[in-house]
Image (cartoon, rainbow, N blue to C red):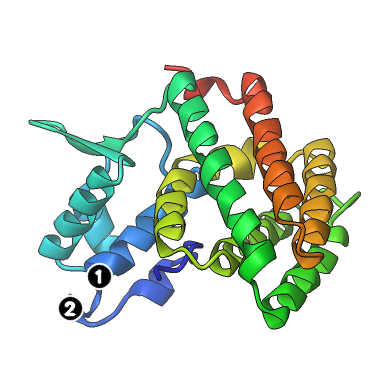
Amino acid sequence: MEKYVSMALTPSTIRKPGDAVSARDIGEWLRDRIRRGRFVPGQRLIEADIIRETGASRSRVREAIQRLESEGLLVIEEFRGASVKRFSIEELRQIYRARMALEGMAAHDFALLGGQDQKQALMAIQEQLNTCENTADHERFAALNDEWHRLIIEGGRNDYIGTFVQRLRVPLYRLLFATFYSSERLDLANAGHRKITIAIVNGDAQEAERLMREHIEEGLGALSGIDIEFHS
């Protein structure tokens, strides 16, 4: 199963001799920059700049760009090249509704099928998330939040859900990272996390699914407050 969370790759960590930098490496590098707002919606990606910063070959960079286009993260236009895709509010609503169904199923199945070790790991992550409340530590919360969701996807034992959710979440990374994780939003989100964690650990599959859908729907409800650049 493909890893659920994109790892942060910096020029120092990605740079390898020649073609040793794979298209997958470049894809992760690009996703991380989209997530953190280094590449913003509508921004053109210059192949020469990517090659210089990563040490990758031109063919690997082009392969990575084509992969991200197939995922819906980039747009490739004739005579203009690749740019970061702009998502409309309606597209973001559709993404959230798809996540409600998929991650709701994952929480349901984790409650039924997850092993004790997996549930203990989820509890451990939850305890770390709890320490983020009243701190406004957005970066730490974002990393732990990704791990929490990843554990639930893995615990549900459905590789297809993991693949689909990964693709749905990447367009939202910068939105989540920069806008949703205000102190108030962070505390509200973690209140939902606690309820879901308890339902999963207790094996209450229906309640875990209901709460996960509710948790993601709260994010959908917050779309009205997102950055203007996501309105297209």
User: How far across and how far down the image is residue 30, in percent?
Assistant: 36, 54
User: How far across and how far down the image is residue 220, in percent?
Assistant: 62, 29
| Horizontal relation, residue 173 to residue 61: left or right | right
Of mark 2 and mark 1, the one earlier in the sequence is 2
At a point 67% along the width and 48% down the height, the residue shown is 209
Which of the two residues, 96 or 175, is positioned nearer the viewer here?
96
Answer few, some or many: residues within 10 Å of disc 1's Cα (few below 14, many 20 plus, some between 14 and 19): many
Mark 2 sits on what residue? 18
Residue 110 vertical position relative to residue 68 in the rendered view, above or below: below
**Residue 38 seen by the camera:** no
Circle 1 SS class: loop
Can you tell which quarter of the image residue 131 is in? bottom right
- The image quadrant where one finds the C terminus is top left
Q: Which mark is residue 55?
A: 1
Dot 2 and dot 1 residues touching (CB under 8 Å): yes
**Residue 42 seen by the camera:** yes
Which of the two residues, 4 or 97, is positioned nearer the viewer here?
97
